[in-house]
Amino acid sequence: MRVLHVLDHSIPLHSGYSFRTLAILEQQRLRGWETIHLTTPKHHLPVPPKEEVDGWTFYRTPDPPSFLAGFPGGSEVALVRGVARRLAEVAGETRPDLLHAHSPVLNALPTLWVARRLRLPVVYEVRAFWEDAAVSHGTGRPEDLRYRLGRALETFALRRSNAVTTICEGLRRDIIRRGIAPEKVTVIPNAVDAAHFSGPQPPDKDLAERLGVAGRVVLGFFGSFYRYEGLHTLLRAVPALAEKNPAIRILLVGGGFEAKNLKQDAAQLGIADKVVFVGRVPHGDIQKYYDLADILIYPRISIRLTELVTPLKPLEAMAQERIVLASDIGGHRELIRNDVTGYLFPPDDPAALAARVLDVLDRRADWPATRARALAFVRNERSWPISVARYEQVYARALSSVRGGAAEPIMSGSA
């Protein structure tokens, strides 16, 4: 079977989106399926029309003409038209059996258009809703016309796709509430390859000294600095934490839109000496920074996006046998069983966060069992081979809906 994936962006760009994509492609290849990959102009790198990256071939879409950019929605219309033209070219060259569009909806719309012309089935994979992502980044509001239009377009695409997948139960429930038949929607959850991770190693003493965390109790966060990650809540908890335990330090590895604001917060709170902003580090070095942290903390705030969508970073931490402490929101509850595989605290509440950190630090005797249960959860329920296997029935149903007749399993290696 030949599957053409329509993607927002891909490697060599590093993001949770591109890492999930790569894991899916690797597992689909292992199942004997042929995968083809097209990215949109949002890949945002100067690239040739066809590019090889780490043994993978990606078809690229050029930037659309800018003459529509001055009109409301013009840039989005231009993008959709440009992707549709490029997708038609690539599909004509590669002759896929099925089109698999991944979020956002601006990828689904041209895919549906081309699929109708070519009489191909479409699987639409929802990783997050475009309109909610805009709100989380501060570029939209739920009462805006743009938000309502984005929601209507998502529902339009969901209804017209032959099959729908999504990454978690929160998104699945929302999709069903839009009137989509439950049997049409399959969860393909975020996962990790536990074999790629190792358990905690002794800290790099030189690195710890250089960062000023040697002999300290380290709370670490690794990822992008968006407002919804709740790092401002973490910083507001530090004065109470330091009063009870002066050895506590915060290790923030990564960067993003909120980096400047967070540094200002640390200075205004008088805790700049207790917060280490490392910045982005090479992927090959990240393990050394994980080994410095006693607890990995994920203080996401409670908004619609975080209540619906599961993140990937806590799973990676659990695969590394780390102690995970996270806010009690819908996206985290799908990953973490409180006091079993990790620890939860009320969101948006610095005092509650501080109290929970101190409580978890007092329960170090429980940590080995917590780590073991978290690792078992990842291996038994959230490994990529288990997750990607679910596409077999999804693709079979999508193909059957176009060809007619009952869906049959797609055998590995079938053409």
Image (cartoon, rainbow, N blue to C red):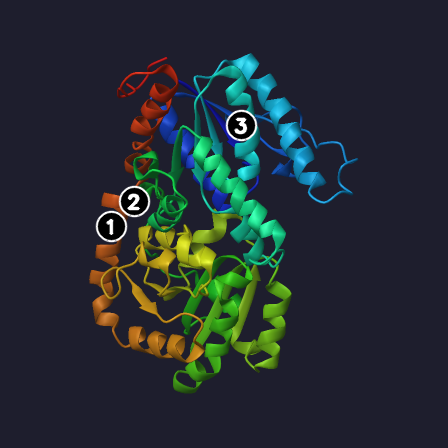
Label 1: which secondary element = helix
Let me know if residue 72 appears in the view.
Answer: yes
Question: With respect to residue 311, does 110 lie above or below?
Answer: above
On screen, residue 161 above or below 210 = above
The quarter holding residue 339 reads: bottom left
Residue denoted by label 2: 382
333 versus 37 height, above or below: below
Kind of residue indicated by mark 2: Arg
Left or right of 243? Residue 142 is right
* Residue 327 placement, left or right of 102: left
In the rendered image, which quarter is residue 410 located in? Answer: top left
Viewport quadrant of the C terminus: top left
Kindly report the distance in space between the C-alpha atoms of the residues bearing marks 3 and 2.
29 Å
Residue 108 image offset from top left, x and y in percent: 52, 33
Q: Nearer the viewer, residue 411 or 405?
A: 405
Q: Can the viewer see residue 32 in this picture? A: no
Residues at badges 3 and 1 in contact (C-beta under 8 Å)?
no
* Residue topped by disc 3: 111
The residue furthest front is 179
> How far is mark 2 from mark 1, CA to CA?
7 Å
Going from the N terminus, do you reach mark 3 or mark 1 first?
A: 3
User: In which quadrant of the rendered view does residue 382 lie?
Assistant: top left
Percent position of residue 183, x then y? 30, 35
Q: Which residue is mark 1?
A: 377
- With 4 as the anchor, is 31 left or right in this view? left
Which residue is located at x 64 percent, y 23 percent? Answer: 85
Instruction: Tell me which amino acid carries mark 1.
Output: Phe
Mark 1 neighbour class, 10 Å CA radius: few under 14, some 14 to 19, many 20 or more: some
